[in-house]
Image (cartoon, rainbow, N blue to C red):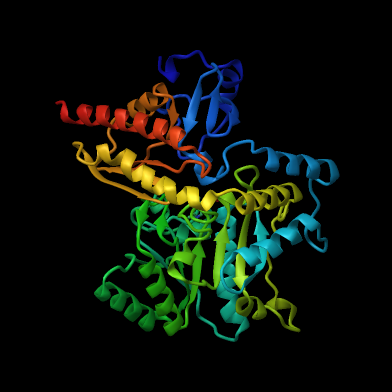
Amino acid sequence: MSVEKQSPPAWQQSGYRHVWMPYTQMQTAPLPIPVVATEGVYLTLADGRKLVDGMASWWTACHGYNHPHIRSAVEAQLRVMPHVMFGGVNHEPALRLAERLAKLTPGDLNRVFFSDSGSVSVEVALKIAVQYWLNRGVSGRTKFVSFQHAYHGDTTGAMSVCDPDNSMHRHFKGFLLEQYSHPVPQTDDEHSAFEAFLATKNSEIAGVIIEPLIQGAGGMKFHPPESVARIHSACRRQNVLLIADEIATGFGRTGTMFACEQADVVPDILCVGKALTGGTLSLAATIATDEIFDAFLSDDPSHALMHGPTFMANPLACAAANASIDLFETEPRLERALAIERELAELLAPCRNLHGVVDVRSKGAVGVIQVNRLHHVERLRSRLVEEGIWLRPFSDMIYMTPALSITPEELQTLCEATVRVVQEWSTWMSSP
Ligand SMILES: Cc1ncc(COP(=O)(O)O)c(C=O)c1O
């Protein structure tokens, strides 16, 4: 029986009319799936069914849900100090986390600015980049270069560096700051054109922002490490900053702790979020190199970074993040991410030649079935649930970002069910 045919729980019946769901046309959307519990890679629904979760809650629950180590760290912190302001006050969970992030990230990315969501960490990165130039006495560098299919978040500055034409934010043109958008260069000619562009505009460009290796919500497009390495070299030669948005790719998703490592690149600024707390609490960070941070040191108070979210460095979230990093140190997450890449390639291969399927690809623990047009999306979603799995197809793709702790058997269940449903979907597409 499809989820829509189940009788919704009382709390959903009375509360739904008061909630505004994300990325949802509320007039036509079916009721969301009522989830009452999570464990490992499973969601438990209000009617008792369990779904294998292929989303890890938007890339976050990298160790699976309710990991006991993270839970006990958060419980212990909750008893002592759930929150304290960060302005003028410090606490051990945040400073320990900052030190560990500085060690974990490549090169001299040594200064950590905490915030409460990925989008805000991007806003902070953009502000840091603009002010870096001002503090160095260079004016006029207020624009950014981002890439086609980029997605960097939903706040105003972050929206301005999303793809201006293909993104969900395109109708805000005119409201958003105008930035430059380029295809991710891959060939020699494209790299030369990209660098030539930087050369002609660099007096107005503060920085280039990239999602290294995998562009997420803008289309799940992959590019090779060489592209990132050459973009980084071009930025160096043309004296513009490079911001790596690793909010989605960070913490093992691509098979290394950070995607930049595969390109052997140390960006000037790195954004992390999502899996930072192992999917437990909202926390993000903007991490700057020593050189960037030093530009804010001055006798002039106006050279300071004027940003400070109320809940920045929340101790509960920092405790969760420290516990999550412990798990990366003690459990074979990166090895598993690489194995997942191979398993996804094999298990999703039967979709490759189906009518309507354009491409099947995997990188680390990300699997994508790209289609020419995602017709029948609600029918597709409800068939996936009937098959016992949770995925959220959108745009032109059915994709999965499972927990890095998913077992081979669980991944097989997830992929086999996906393949069955995509095969069915393909026949709906072929019938008149
Ligand atoms: C690459 C990237 N940047 C930024 C964001 C925004 O993060 P948040 O949703 O935490 O604001 C996301 C979220 O999907 C993302 O994938």
Q: Quadrant of the C terminus?
A: top left
Q: Residue at x 38, y 63 (%)?
A: 147
Q: Nearer the viewer, residue 366 or 68?
A: 68
Q: Is residue 247 visible?
A: yes
The furthest residue to the bottom: 137
Q: Residue at x 74, y 78 (%)?
A: 301
Can you say whether 259 is above or below 201 in the image? above
Q: Nearer the viewer, residue 134 or 93?
A: 93
Q: Residue at x 47, y 79 (%)?
A: 240
Q: Quadrant of the N terminus?
A: top left
Based on the displayed image, in which of its 4 quarters is residue 136 positioned?
A: bottom right
Residue 56, horizontal then vertical, whole percent: 51, 40
Q: Nearer the viewer, residue 252 or 359?
A: 252
Q: Is residue 137 left or right of residue 383?
A: right
Q: Is residue 75 left or right of residue 180?
A: right
- Please state the total of marks drawn on the protein image: 0
Q: Is residue 173 visible?
A: no
